[in-house]
Image (tube, coloured by chain):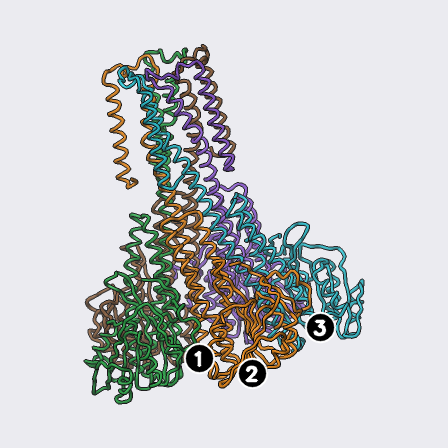
Chain colours: A purple, B cyan, C orange, D green, E brown
Amino acid sequence: MSIKITTRRSEKTGLPPGSLVHVGDLKEEEAVITVMEYDEADFSERRVSSMEEALAAVGRRRNVWINVDGLHQVELLAGLGEGLSIGALALEDVLNTHQRPKIEETGDSLFIVFRMFYLDAEKEEVASEQVSLFLGENYVVSFQESEGDVFDKLRARIKSSVGRVRKMGPDYLAYALMDAVVDNYFLVLEAVEDRLEELDEEVYERPSHETIQDIHRLKREVLFLRKSIYPLREVAGSILRSESGLLTEATEAYFRDLNDHVMQVVDAVDSYRELISGLLDVYLSSVSNRMNDVMKILTIISTIFIPLSFLAGVYGMNFDNMPETHFEWAYYVFWGVIIVLALAMVWNFKKRKWI
Amino acid sequence: MSIKITTRRSEKTGLPPGSLVHVGDLKEEEAVITVMEYDEADFSERRVSSMEEALAAVGRRRNVWINVDGLHQVELLAGLGEGLSIGALALEDVLNTHQRPKIEETGDSLFIVFRMFYLDAEKEEVASEQVSLFLGENYVVSFQESEGDVFDKLRARIKSSVGRVRKMGPDYLAYALMDAVVDNYFLVLEAVEDRLEELDEEVYERPSHETIQDIHRLKREVLFLRKSIYPLREVAGSILRSESGLLTEATEAYFRDLNDHVMQVVDAVDSYRELISGLLDVYLSSVSNRMNDVMKILTIISTIFIPLSFLAGVYGMNFDNMPETHFEWAYYVFWGVIIVLALAMVWNFKKRKWI
Amino acid sequence: MSIKITTRRSEKTGLPPGSLVHVGDLKEEEAVITVMEYDEADFSERRVSSMEEALAAVGRRRNVWINVDGLHQVELLAGLGEGLSIGALALEDVLNTHQRPKIEETGDSLFIVFRMFYLDAEKEEVASEQVSLFLGENYVVSFQESEGDVFDKLRARIKSSVGRVRKMGPDYLAYALMDAVVDNYFLVLEAVEDRLEELDEEVYERPSHETIQDIHRLKREVLFLRKSIYPLREVAGSILRSESGLLTEATEAYFRDLNDHVMQVVDAVDSYRELISGLLDVYLSSVSNRMNDVMKILTIISTIFIPLSFLAGVYGMNFDNMPETHFEWAYYVFWGVIIVLALAMVWNFKKRKWI
Amino acid sequence: MSIKITTRRSEKTGLPPGSLVHVGDLKEEEAVITVMEYDEADFSERRVSSMEEALAAVGRRRNVWINVDGLHQVELLAGLGEGLSIGALALEDVLNTHQRPKIEETGDSLFIVFRMFYLDAEKEEVASEQVSLFLGENYVVSFQESEGDVFDKLRARIKSSVGRVRKMGPDYLAYALMDAVVDNYFLVLEAVEDRLEELDEEVYERPSHETIQDIHRLKREVLFLRKSIYPLREVAGSILRSESGLLTEATEAYFRDLNDHVMQVVDAVDSYRELISGLLDVYLSSVSNRMNDVMKILTIISTIFIPLSFLAGVYGMNFDNMPETHFEWAYYVFWGVIIVLALAMVWNFKKRKWI
Amino acid sequence: MSIKITTRRSEKTGLPPGSLVHVGDLKEEEAVITVMEYDEADFSERRVSSMEEALAAVGRRRNVWINVDGLHQVELLAGLGEGLSIGALALEDVLNTHQRPKIEETGDSLFIVFRMFYLDAEKEEVASEQVSLFLGENYVVSFQESEGDVFDKLRARIKSSVGRVRKMGPDYLAYALMDAVVDNYFLVLEAVEDRLEELDEEVYERPSHETIQDIHRLKREVLFLRKSIYPLREVAGSILRSESGLLTEATEAYFRDLNDHVMQVVDAVDSYRELISGLLDVYLSSVSNRMNDVMKILTIISTIFIPLSFLAGVYGMNFDNMPETHFEWAYYVFWGVIIVLALAMVWNFKKRKWI
């Protein structure tokens, strides 16, 4: 996961507010626009090549879902703004892909921005992109940074009329889109939890120089997750309190449920933070403990042999008059003393539980 | 205690909201349904084999308590939903066993989810499962993940008409169920406190490599307890503020009392966290202190013998002209110097309070 | 101070709520009931042997203060409940001696629980017990776990009609009781502060292995104090906002003053926590510093003598052809070289400010 | 700065609330009472010897400022209470010199307590004392613990009619007094900042055992400052929200400005705390780094000379058959090997960037 | 970045509130006043030499923007205060360049103070200055401490009528000025992020004594940023809630957008703090790890050679009767034993993964 805390907006500084410039890391040349029209009875889905074509569908059936993958073609947004009378600032936020999750009324529609996380199988890491929704009386327009499969299952449910989605209005669709994203959070949390468990084992059993770096990296990812998901609490809450008339009572329970899920994710992320900080403590204390072990070995060896070496040194001296050296058993006595001393030391270390 | 922060929901991702799929760790094949009907005068209890049979009892007496142990048979819930007109999302939450504690109005009933902790005698650890309650005008339906004995004493009180429970309505029963669970928290807290005390003693008297791991493990458990119990504060509060008409004034004082108990548990858990972090400090400083001791021994031995060895080395040299070596008392003088030096060192260390 | 975070409630689990069972550490066999009746003109005080006798006094004069020392005789409470129509849950809280401080309306009276701290001269530690008050229209009933002298001065003031207490109603008496307890907190804070100062000195001047344990112990006590006093803020606040009619305007200023004192105590306890955590930092860094000093000595000795020993070793070798050994002044040159080397080392260490 | 967190109130425990006893550290025998009467046209200032004399001035001109330096003469306060009908509890707070900053309505006047900090030039430390104000319809009574010069400039402004003070009422005077005190905070903050900068430099360039103690001491002072200034935020806020009618609209902007200054002080104090904790980190890591350096030297010396000493030891052995010893060039070869080995080691350490 | 937490206000203490004295670090002798008049149709810009001249323009066209660079000429402000009836306290805040960001109504205008950050290319650091705005019915007066180019692009947009600015009133201009400043924050955040990334790499790959100091320095800068930007949240919020009538509905969306940006900056700054504290952990653990490595080398060398040296010492002794010394192969056996012992040690260390 690339931890970009802020957007590189340098290129944009000084432009008038509401200027439509794409600021983000994922650049797909060609945006893909899919239009899905459906009501309880009927369903159609097709790719269109221009925003005008897509907007023409609005109003024909109860629900129209226009999904745009890829943000690089800023002219699409300009068209959208005119067609649905959406303010330039909201459109700017769609393009500026490091938004804080938020909800806003703009013109006749609700504008919701949040962040989607998914596991990038190739790079073996967690990736993220921004999802923006415009919810109108009879349409939902959604924007993703790149083509993804998070909404595929929802699309299939609409197609095959599984669940409630065909029977409900666009507010339920907006909910279903957000729910799909939040459901995906749990997959990401599972991945984080797996890595946490691996690190936990590593810290206890084979801590290495890399462990601390892995802990730090995971901490950064969790920090980024937290930063992206925390404001979602307010978003989910604001939707429930919103008085825009776009949300029917029937979907309210669903949004409350979504709210619960967001709270669960937030709780989990907070728990990860604490667990990681606990891991760090264990790691640091294990480093200290290993140092202790190293020092003990050094001390044991030194404490045993340094005095003995001194004794050997003494009898290596060349004084003319060293009576002991002439005793016949002196050498054996010397070894005896040495061994007794060494054993006394070893016994002492045993008592201290060092060996 | 297995610290699962989030549910493994992978298998569920993409299903429409409200899909009844059991997501949890405890899987019992056969759910056990017990129906208890009672009012002040009368009492009956029996096991039934289907939800329809159980629901048939609702309305016959003032209070009906349907208790379901085991969540694997999702069809039970479907039946319940129809029989008592409970929303699918609430039923989904019953099955999804890592819910945040919460309270919700669904249809004509109040839906309360919380987590029960108990001491698993076999595994010598704290175990937990989710308890869900539906409180209606004349019924309480409760769900547990597995058969447990937490409610046994309550059952006995109903049977033998001890206390107030027979005289009161289903709201009091709901309270009594929650109270039984919260009462059990105190047992778990006692267990945590016992382990905390053991660790405290261990840290002071015989800290080992395992100590830090035990501290970390306890910290994780307390973290999990906290995560599960914290939201209960809001639940207890919401019940008091609830305007559903299901709660009579007579039971209000009881719920307020419950609220107090929850606050006490939360306070205790917060205290444990601080005590554990204090333990960690003591542990780390004791590691440092032991290192200090090891280093002192090494330094004492080295500081005494390294200079002496040097002296011995000097008189082991083979220079032709080393006048001292020929003095008759030289060897004895040498020993004298050595001993004086050594004693001076020892005295110095004594002064520094090292030995 | 025994740090019991929660009550041992094991024996109580499963009993119906409102069961009167004494849960606490201080067990006095015989409860002592004192009844004090007074108004501006008159005053009487006597010991009675039963609650009925005590309650008979209520209503005779403007103020009746019934004080009960010792909680073990649960039948007293039952009598009280009936006599003054007080709910069973409040009575249960009186017996359960690890309550969170709180205020509650129960029947016609206000129920206030809080914790008293005092210095146990014998055990040289801070002890604590729970105090419960029932404030009615013309009575105050107070419960203590054991006979203490905290209220003695208040009693003397009533007897000798010093201050305002005889002229005011039972709400002022309730205030005076709480004020006596809060006043006592300051004595306990002084004791904590004294120990903090001792530890501060110890950490700077003679840190030992015990120091960290003393710091930890003090930290635990402060943690316990904080846990017991924090909720008192809300209690003092709720009394001011209470609309029970039991509090006259005249005593409001007194309760506001009490509130200020509680805030002061809370501020002080928070400051202690920070000071203690600061002490810990100083202690740990002093351990590191001492280690540094030990290592420096080892390094100085080793760095001076190890090279010298090598040189001595060289001239102790038995090669046939070692020309230097035959020079007449070689031995003196050797000593010269040794001394120069040693002085160079010492000078080097001086420059590094190690010695 | 003497860090007294709580007042020594031992001597006061048990007295009835509202007892006028001076509890504080600064004891001046004789209180100095100054009365200043002024309106836009006129001005007079004189010392009086009794409170009655001072109070006689109230009402004669638009503004009367009675300033009392020294709190030891408690009878002054009793007189004040009667003369201006001020409650005993407020008077008690004046005497109890470790109050939390607060504002209170008492009788017809507003009672404001806060703490003044100033640089004690003699003792080279920050000193503090309590300032209490009573603001009435046409008077301000202020109390200081000792004679100070903080209000001198304000006095001069009144005398010479500089600024607005002569044109405004007593509420502006109260503001001006508080403003003088808050202005002084900035001087104290500058002193703290200077010491912080010195410590910063010390930590980076010549950390010693004393550094940690100085950091700790500064931390304690900042903690004390914070404790005394934090509640002032609420005070400043309450004044703005107060509905006592004593504050005219004209002075409101001034109190808002005061509020801003208090917020700035609070922000600064919070920043100091973080900077100090940062300093501690740097200090601890510098201790570790120095230890590392010491260890490196020891390791370098040992690693070079211990193997060489071993070699020298080998050729000092007395085996009959040691062929090398008889080679003519053996000794020179020995030296060659030694030097090569030593250089290899040095090169190795160079590569590791140790030397 | 110079971290001045508070202003040096010493020179100002004691002056009456509202005294216009410049308190700041950037002193430019000559203030530069630029007047820009514009409406949708017309535009003019010129430098004027006095405030009177500048104020004469107010009212002539829909929008007048008076920009003052340099605060040293306090008489300018006095003129402004009279001309636009702005209170002295607000003018004082303009001159006092370490204000907390805030918004205030003063007379007929809104007064907004905030802090601008920019990259000082010369000194390679982040610099900051205070910006003050007065927003009236048909004017904006802005103050900067020195001439900067942050507003240049906005000026160009007005000149060339790009974007909406010419069509809107002075409230939009005020927004545009604040937006320009907040936009600049992102540049500063990018610079911080770059340094964070460098430090991150440094900590992992080549931590040195300077690293900790760089981390600490960055921490201080982030702390300063945070302190300056945090209160801006409230400012942005207050503007939206303001009821002054100076803000038209049309600009509300823009201020809401500004609010979002401020929140993003605050989030980012908070994330930096956590990342920096994470860096510190990694740094400290890397120091410990390096110490561990040093100790291991010392221990390996000592553990191998100290026992061997002892053995060599033994056979260097001069006892008359040492039978081994006379064996012909003794010397070779000795070497064999030595090598076996050394290899055993090496193998042991390999097993411990030390080498």
Mark nearest the camera among 2 and 1 is 1
Q: Is residue B252 visible?
A: no
Residue A222 x/y as whole percent = 50, 55
Q: Tell me the element at label 2.
A: loop
Q: State the residue position of label 3.
A: B164
| Element carrying mark 1 | loop
Mark 1, residue position: C162
User: Which chain is mark 3 on?
Assistant: B
Name the image quarter holding residue A162: bottom right
The amino acid marked with disc number 3 is Arg
Q: Secondary structure at mark 3?
A: loop
Left of B191 or right of it: where is D208? left
| Disc nearest the viewer among 2 and 3 | 2
With D287 as the anchor, is C176 left or right in this view? right
Q: Is residue C132 left or right of residue D305?
A: right
Give above or below for C160 relative to A124.
below
Q: Are discs 1 and 3 less than 8 Å apart at CB?
A: no
